[in-house]
Amino acid sequence: MQRKLTDAKVKHLKPKDRGYKTADGGGLYVFTNTKGTKSFRYDFKHQDKYATITLGQYPNLSLSEARKLHEKAYNEVLNNIDPRAQKDAEKLLEKPFSFYAQEMMSTQDLRPTTAKKKLAKMERHLFKPLDTKPVHLITAVDLLNLLKPIADKGKRETTKDLATYCRQTFNYLLSLQLIENNPAATIAELLPKPKKSANFAHITNPKELAKLLRGIDTYEGDISIKQALQLMPLVMLRPYNIRFMKWEYVDIENRLITIPADEMKMEREHKIPLSNQAIDILNQASYLSKKNEYVFLSAYGLRTGKPMSENTLNQAVIRIKDEQTGEPIGRGIMTSHGFRHTASTMLNELGYNSDAIELQLAHASKDRIRATYNKAELLPERTTMMQEWADYLDELKGQT
């Protein structure tokens, strides 16, 4: 086809009282508006209807580049394809991986806590490296190079989850017909398999537990982290529920914490009776964070309003020191989650009602729940048990 424009001619087009067209050939032209802005446009006929597509603005889009885009669109019209649909698809592909990952999540029926954890993992490991490349150009090798080093660091369970999130996101893109294959379809098979699950490290020896509790009381780090660690053995909550505990859940007057169902793993509202010792810790925490949403906020959290990170409590446990040697004693013998196992084991050994213990841990079976809920969740019995447990821990700390 014959072309009429030159770079110099496009450059020197001037604004007029009304916008005007300057033809190049084959339906391609430059439209100059009254302010002098120039855009390359293509007028075409598709299915007996006339339409216009804007290819881009000059000088961001050069004349030679505009002609290449025009030729592509021109050939699409010859093949009975609407170039506007192709351009819309290309615009969608300009969005990053993180956009589609979050769109994918919005189609899933996830509990708020699950969605929050899933998004946090993707933000930490996937979004930054994958957003640097158009989604249709991401390959299985790219994903393997990203995920395998994470697995090699021992985070195999995390890597398994990330591989699943990638597969789900690319399946979403497949459903939109924006890609032709899923690069994450079999990526999990190329990654090291997670090790068989084992109980979280925990202490069941009273003397060792006493030493650890005294170490917590003399913890020299952030005061809110110390208070969170002090509360954990007294309430037997999961670390997540400690980190995300809000003041609206805490009823000091009625000596009760009530965590809503959507914050609990078993999706049931959970009531936790508070001992005198737990009340004291919460009262101390209120001086620092009562004006904020969350009960336990580190110094960073007080500035940002964000709760503690996932690994904060575990790292704090690792740094707890032996009172005599001054050496860290937490690594390998206890994790923040391990306090639940410790309390469960020792309370059973001390002869407390196993139903009351399971209800306190919030992981009783449905059959057991049905039976015990008829007894008001054994709340009076659990109240007595948790006060006696707190007193027992104080006695342990006093022994040498």
Image (cartoon, helix red, strand yellow):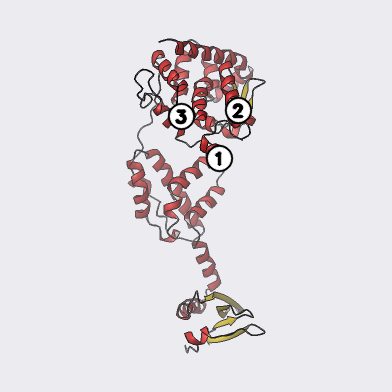
Instruction: Determine the secondary structure under disc 2.
Output: helix
Q: Does the image show residue 192? A: no
Residue 246, compared with residue 120, is above or below; it is: above
Residue that badge 1 annotates: 303
Task: Name the residue type under label 2.
Answer: Tyr
Q: Which mark is residue 221?
A: 3
Going from N to C along the chain, the mark reached first, 1 or 2, is 2
Q: Mark 1 and mark 2 in contact? Answer it, CB < 8 Å.
A: no
Q: Is residue 340 left or right of residue 189?
A: right
Given residues 331 and 112, the one toward you in this image is 331
Q: Is residue 85 left or right of residue 400?
A: right
Going from N to C along the chain, the mark reached first, 3 or 2, is 3
Quarter holding the C terminus is: top left
Given residues 23 and 33, the one toward you in this image is 33
Task: Name the residue type under label 3.
Answer: Gly
Residue that badge 2 annotates: 287
Going from N to C along the chain, the mark reached first, 1 or 3, is 3
